[in-house]
Amino acid sequence: MSAAAEAALRTAEALERSAGLNATLHWSPELLRAEAARADATRAARGSDPALYATPVAVKDNIVTVEQPTTCASKILEGYTSPFTATAVERLRAAGAMVACKSNLDEFAMGSSTEHSAFGRVMHPEFPDRVPGGSSGGSAALVAAGVVPVALGSETGGSVRQPAAFCGVVGFKPSYGRVSRYGLVAFASSLDAISVFSGTTSNAARVLQVISGHDPLDATSLLEPPVTVGPARGSLAGVRIGLPAEYLPADLDPGVRAAVERTADLLRSSGAELVDVSLPHTRYAVPAYYIVAPAEASSNLARFDGVRYGHRAAEQGDVAALYAATRGEGFGAEVRRRILVGSYVLSAGYYDAYYRKAQQVRALIAADFHDAFQQVDFLLAPTTPTPAFRAGEKTEDPVAMYQADIFVCPANLAGVPAISVPAGRSGGLPVGIQLLAPYRKDADLLELAMTVEAGLDRQAEVR
Ligand code: GLN
């Protein structure tokens, strides 16, 4: 049996065993076998092992593939299969990787806990009464449970870094435009970024090297070749790392604060200089994000009308009645809430007060990063204000759920790359720290993160 066929078999067994997590939406042993055969054909054509030969990858179910359905965890897309495959998935396969499954998510990637899936919530792999984070909770749980070494998720406002921190794995969001969005179902197009989960930073780097690079099918993709990531940095002498005051508020969870402090100590002992910096508009990031993202979502989701994709209501009236009935039946409460907020902030009477203002604030947030990166090479911050919260804790209070994104959504608004690295445990729960870099400095960021990861015992209690 080839290495790919063996890996496919092992992955199928692991997926079977992890069924209780509810982390997957579509997979089958037959499809895995077909993926293995494809990886072997790629290898035979090349005459050597491609970069990701026989690597099983979980793919968030808002990234389209021809072989499996794509539902975005929504009833409105139940039974829908795309006629084309996302560029990132095509590139993974060309490098010998295998799609292991499509993973569960918050409906249309809207949420921070993966409790908003139309197909049931995803369990935290170690603490079943807690959430794995979201919206890419299925991919995070599968990597944390050891079912797959790497997975694709998507970020609009932290949906890979936040679940990575909650589950104790690496979550990397590249610079906006670094990875083609072709085949990523659009949530907020000016923010969306296909992003990577992995056990180790070096595996995230291996995936980025394969999926990055200009794609003529995405007009916003950077006109640059694939990223090349070097080895971990040895000495950090001469490297300046900023600690933003706004990311270390007085009410920060003590375990999260301890994880940041221990990382700062490690960076200092490796020769880096730690510098206090300020990103003064941080407190406006969540309000700005929750105007810009729903505004774009209300426009992007207009295409789900019962005519072009998936579910269609039985309504027999005129076409407007058909649209309304289909959308009312097909979209869950959180998605409906976003569409209503987005339509409101874009409406003629409120555009200036909300949408235009939010775009101005977004520019100030981007300028904060620009200014900070005049003084320092990287930023160190917590990924989340607390470790994984309990299931049900925030489902009745959407604003409390939104506030959990405070430290992650600024990087999306500014387009800069950011990574969450496991930094220990607080009361047994995983805690992540976040490193951020200037726009397009993805390779530098990953090289720094490898150094940090090597110096932190991710199982150690830090509080
Ligand atoms: N939690 C954020 C939201 O609900 C981010 C989602 C995402 O990054 N896809 O919009």
Image (cartoon, helix red, strand yellow):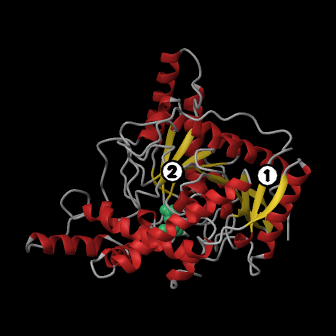
Residue 152 at least partly seen: yes
Q: Nearer the viewer, mark 1 or mark 2?
A: 1
Residue 21 at least partly seen: no
Give the amino acid at mark 1: Arg
Q: Which mark is residue 240?
A: 1
Q: Is residue 189 left or right of residue 441?
A: left
Name which residue lies at 83% across and 68% down. Answer: 258
What residue is pinned by disc 2? 176
Q: Neighbour class for label 2 at 10 Å: few (<14), some, many (≥20)?
A: many
Name which residue lies at 83% across and 58% down. Answer: 274
Q: What quarter of the picture does the N terminus occupy? A: top right
Give the amino acid at mark 2: Tyr
Query: Is the CB of the residue bearing disc 2 within 8 angstroms of ligand 1?
Result: no
> In terms of depth relative to the viewer, which is nearer, 265 or 453?
265
**SS at mark 1 in the image:** strand
- Residue 421 on image: x %, y %: 72, 55
Name which residue lies at 15% across and 71% down. Answer: 322
Q: Neighbour class for label 1 at 10 Å: few (<14), some, many (≥20)?
A: some
Residue that lies at the very extreme toward the right in this rendered image: 269
Q: Is residue 157 left or right of residue 272?
A: left
- Residue 167 on image: x %, y %: 67, 61
- Residue 378 on image: x %, y %: 72, 53
